[in-house]
Image: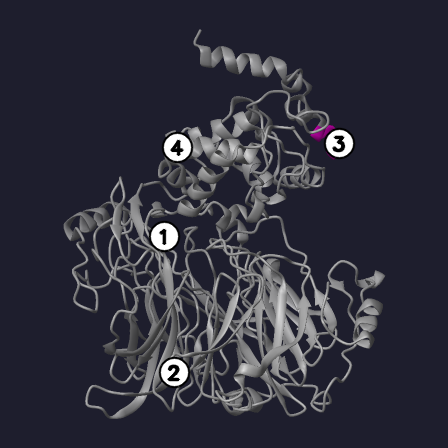
Amino acid sequence: MKFLGTPLALAAVLALSAPLASQAQEIKAATETKPSSKYGDMSVVTQDQLNRAATDSSNFLQTNGDYRQQRFYPNRQINASNVAKLRPAWIFQTEIKESLETSPIVVNGVMFVTTSFSQVYALDARTGEEMWHFTPKMGPITTFCCGPNNRGVAVSGNLVYMATLDSQLIALDAKTGKVVWKTEIADPEDGYSETMAPTVVKGKVLIGTNGGEYGIKGFVKAYDALTGKLVWTFNTVPDKSIGVWAEKDPTGRVLHRDIAAEKAQLAKTGDPSKTLGGGVWQNPAVDLDTNRIYFVVGNPSPDLDGAQRPGDNLYTDSLVSLDLDTGKYVCHFQYVPHDVWDLDAVSPPVITNVADKDGKPIKGILHAGKTGHVYVHDAKDCSLIRYSEAMVPQENMWVLPTKEGARMLPGANGGVEWSPIATNPSLGLAYAINLHQPMTYQVQSSAYPSGKLWLGGAFKVIPTEEQWGNVTAVDYNTGKIRWQVKTPQPMIGGILATAGGLVFTGEGNGEFKAYDAENGSVLWHFQAGAGVNAPPSSYAIEGKQYIVVGAGGNTQLDYKRGNSIIAFTVD
Amino acid sequence: MSLKILSKMLIAAACGAILTSGAVRADTIEEKAAVCSGCHGEKGVPVNAVTPIIWGQMEGYLYLELRDFKKGARKNEIMSGIASSLERDDMLALAAYFAAKPWPNLNQPSASDAVTKQAATANGSIGCTGCHLDKYQGTGSVPRLAGQNHDYLAKTLADFRSGERGNNPGMSSLASATSESDLAALETYLAGM
């Protein structure tokens, strides 16, 4: 552990670093949270605070900023005129040097971050001083597709919520890091695991599941926030998953399905819903006005072999809306029916006001796809209003995977991977980070392997072709690209826009940059020494605004690993 | 008698009296584990080249393999026989026991720069480290590959490729999508880590 701070703070951390014998198994260096700022005496997070997160210029209360997931931070103290003076305020080094995908949550001067292998740290957001460190006791079986990642915590009341690689949902005491309750979400031996941050709203903890590469049956579940008791379950794959035998995607491209063969398979083996995948591993957007949630559902299992899963494979690769209270279906929109490329829907959706087809302002939903399009929907019925120009090259879509391998762009990571987008509502822009990673798609059929990796083939990066990434600003009211900046490597991690006219995002080579929100000019950059592949957050303490981001590299793209949480301020 | 059958008999013989000592009659975890050392080695160094290191291997992985041997999803004459007498709790206990042991160093030679580069390119193409993690150390249900017995790695990847080993179709797909030359580079590189 190492951080930059005052000698006094260092001494305090050293004093705290001896494990308490009575809590040695699960809690390390736990102690009472000391008030570290003028906000420190506010001990609980109220639902009203959570509802108003979008206008809270001191805290960062939710994984994607606010319930609408706009990732637009309202504080303008750090802005285009002074961002060149942004400097590290402190660096905290976690004990885990592996992929960091955490969105730091900041509440009343305390920051909560998570690391790979489902560990949680509480830090003094002013100094980076460690307050407590929670290491869950996990069972022997942990599965994942793309690294032992964790994307963060949710906060409500005096509890901190997180989920583990072995599929536990855990509520911790925010002040001490002690377990208040925990429950098993699903059996890890069947391929279920957790990497997402939960969402807490109106007394419920919402959580999905990983496992689209393991033949799970996906879901979103709601638990009672105080007791951990299950309230409702929505199966992302309904018992009738066939759909309408769509022959084209919503952009009009032909999917080249052999519908007759699929129908013959259906007659032979029935609806494939039991092992069809459909993970949900990104946070839902919550519409507090209508009491609805909106989330995206991941790929069908097995990824590349459609022969044994006839039909559209509902609701994989879809935007889905539910009633928050009951978990009942409201509407859905499928981006890629019967996907055999893993070009699924993973970047979290955003609720914002958009222009409808007549130019009239309505409540809309944005989703940035692995396909390279930003899709704009009507929130009322999930219908598609428009989709953006492609942000990355698209070639040979939708050629079917072959035994030898068929080249198609985008590669299976996108376009936009899980990386959350940011928006600037006053500019009407959505900011997305993209990958250009040419791949071939190979199919190889195999039977369901009971919770083991089940790809149905392989997606292979073509080593001889150039890879790159970009940061793209899309006008979601027209679908036009406003500006685009190319980066030397494919991008993954996330992005933050601020009222200071800035956009922050990082790269696999360690660069963390501030862009001008209007035109994409690079206004500031910092070399973090390890891949910056996590979504940035922002907060303010004692009148001073900070930007914070994890630099831990990325397992999936094999970007240089690190273990730093870095907070910046203008100094 | 085919060479394959002869080879299996020789392996069984080399592993000593494991099949007669009987896992069923063993009571403590140490007694149960003693059966395993016949092949996997007293100090964790396997007695022959196609037997894997299990000392220090990932706990979840060891459990799942025992489970699959018992279910018949993974086939091996010796291991299927041993696993058939184990209950789930035995398997979990054995997995925990061996996972806690230190990984032995087989002192296999490091790969040349050219082989290392070829292995890195192959990894960049199919993403081995996406599951086996940086430095191929493994975690949970994903096995450590760094420093594993070279001939076991070679046999395993060949078996994944041919379908002879059928308990991880994801690995079969990835091994099939990789050229034999790239697999050979990976095996040499991993063994020498």
- Secondary element under disc 2, as helix, strand or loop, is strand
- Secondary element under disc 3, as helix, strand or loop, is helix
Q: Are marks 1 and 4 on the same chain?
A: no
Single out the mark in the foreground, 1 or 4. Answer: 4
Q: Which mark is residue B30?
A: 3
Gap in Å between the C-alphas at discs 1 and 4? Answer: 21 Å
Q: Which mark is residue A29?
A: none
**Marked residue chain, label 3:** B
Looking at the image, residue A393 sits to the left or right of residue A75; the answer is: left
Front one among B33 and A69 = A69
Give residue B90's position: percent from left, percent from top.
66, 37
**What amino acid is labelled 3 in the image?**
Glu
Gap in Å between the C-alphas at discs 4 and 2? Answer: 46 Å
Residue A178 in view of the camera: no
**What amino acid is labelled 1 in the image?**
Ser
Which residue is found at the position 38% from the left and 52% from the top?
A275
User: What residue would you read off at disc 4?
Assistant: B161
Gap in Å between the C-alphas at discs 1 and 3? Answer: 41 Å
Gap in Å between the C-alphas at discs 1 and 2? Answer: 29 Å
Q: Which mark is residue A301?
A: 1
**What amino acid is labelled 2 in the image?**
Ile
Residue range of the region highlighted in magenta in the rendering: B29-33
**Marked residue chain, label 2:** A
Front one among B126 and A246 = B126
User: What residue would you read off at disc 2?
Assistant: A351
Query: Could you tell which of marks 3 and 4 lies nearer the N-terminus?
Result: 3
Q: Quadrant location of residue A165?
A: bottom right
Gap in Å between the C-alphas at discs 3 and 4? Answer: 35 Å
Against B12, is A90 above or below?
below
Gap in Å between the C-alphas at discs 2 and 3? Answer: 59 Å
Q: Are marks 3 and 4 on the same chain?
A: yes
Against B71, is A258 above or below?
below
